[in-house]
Structures are given as C-alpha cells and as structure tokens.
Image (cartoon, rainbow, N blue to C red):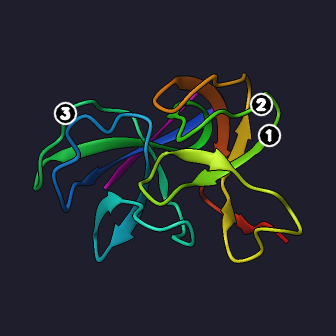
C-alpha cells in the first residue's frame, strides 16, 4: 500500500479483492488486506474508489480523506451527511436516527437521482456513527 498526499486530499493505492469494474465513486471497505465494495449500510467505509475499471488482484486508488466524486444511491441534498448504502453508493445519513450506520462525509452538491456522480468531502480515516 502506498499513500500520496495531493493538496488537501489523501489517496492510497490498495489491492482490489473483487472486481470493482464500473464502481467509480463507490465506498470501499477492508477485506483482510484488500478492498471490496461496501455491501451493507452498516459497513465501515475505508475510502471512495477513484478508478473506473479495476479487477480483483489489481491496484485500485481510493480517496480516504478530502474532496472526491461519489455515486449517489438516490437523491441527496447539498450539505447532507453521507455514508455507504447497501450497494456501496452514497446515501444520506441522519445523525440521531441512523445510529448503526457510518457518516463518512458530506455532499458538496445535490444529486437529483441514483447514479449521479456528485462532489463530496469524505473522512474515511475516522468515520463516525450517525449518533
């Protein structure tokens, strides 16, 4: 694993433990020493995938801290707290309500529908529960 600070963001390169093709902007989680896409709303995110086509065993780049693009799972309002949905996309997290789920960042802009790539700032170094 390598880490490179680029301006106000921290990106790391890690090995993909599964086929991540077409999942740019999705939240990833650790699976041993590799990363796979988050597959439950309660998964602890490790970062956001930057690459579009990464197969298992290849290196993937993810943003751990700072600005990034995320793929929306549904409509998101600008300024909303976000974290992984059941398929690894970003969804709104409500502090005090979604207490078993992780807040991994905040949306910079609104998403009108699922699949939209929007700008967000993430902190997957120390994500916190939406409490």
Q: Are marks 1 and 2 in contact (CB under 8 Å)?
A: yes
Q: Earlier in the sequence, mark 3 or mark 1?
A: 3
Q: Viewed as shown, does residue 73 lie left or right of 52?
A: right
x, y percent for residue 81: 77, 47
Q: Which residues are magenta?
A: 1-8
Residue assigned mark 3? 53
Residue 123 seen in render: no
Residue assigned mark 2? 77
Q: Nearer the viewer, mark 2 or mark 3?
A: 2
Residue at 55% from the left image edge and 66% from the top image edge: 41
Label ID, residue 14: none
x, y percent for residue 75: 65, 33
Alpha-carbon distance for marks 2 and 3?
A: 28 Å
Alpha-carbon distance for marks 3 and 1?
A: 28 Å
Q: Are marks 2 and 3 in contact (CB under 8 Å)?
A: no
Residue assigned mark 1? 80
Predominant secondary structure, magenta span = strand
Q: Viewed as shown, does residue 32 lie left or right of 121?
A: left
């Amino acid at each position: 694993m390598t880490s490179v600070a680029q301006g106000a963001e921290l990106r790391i390169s890690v090995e993909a433990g599964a086929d991540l093709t077409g999942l740019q902007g999705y939240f990833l989680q650790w699976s041993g020493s590799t990363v796979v896409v988050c597959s439950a709303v309660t998964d602890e995110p490790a970062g956001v995938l930057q690459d579009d086509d990464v197969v298992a065993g290849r290196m993937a780049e993810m943003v751990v801290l700072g600005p990034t693009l995320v793929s929306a799972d549904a409509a998101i309002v600008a300024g909303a707290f976000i974290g992984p949905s059941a398929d690894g996309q970003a969804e709104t997290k409500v502090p005090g309500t979604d207490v078993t789920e992780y807040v991994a960042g905040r949306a910079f802009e609104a998403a009108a529908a699922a699949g939209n790539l929007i700008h967000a700032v993430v902190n997957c170094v120390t994500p916190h529960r939406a409490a």
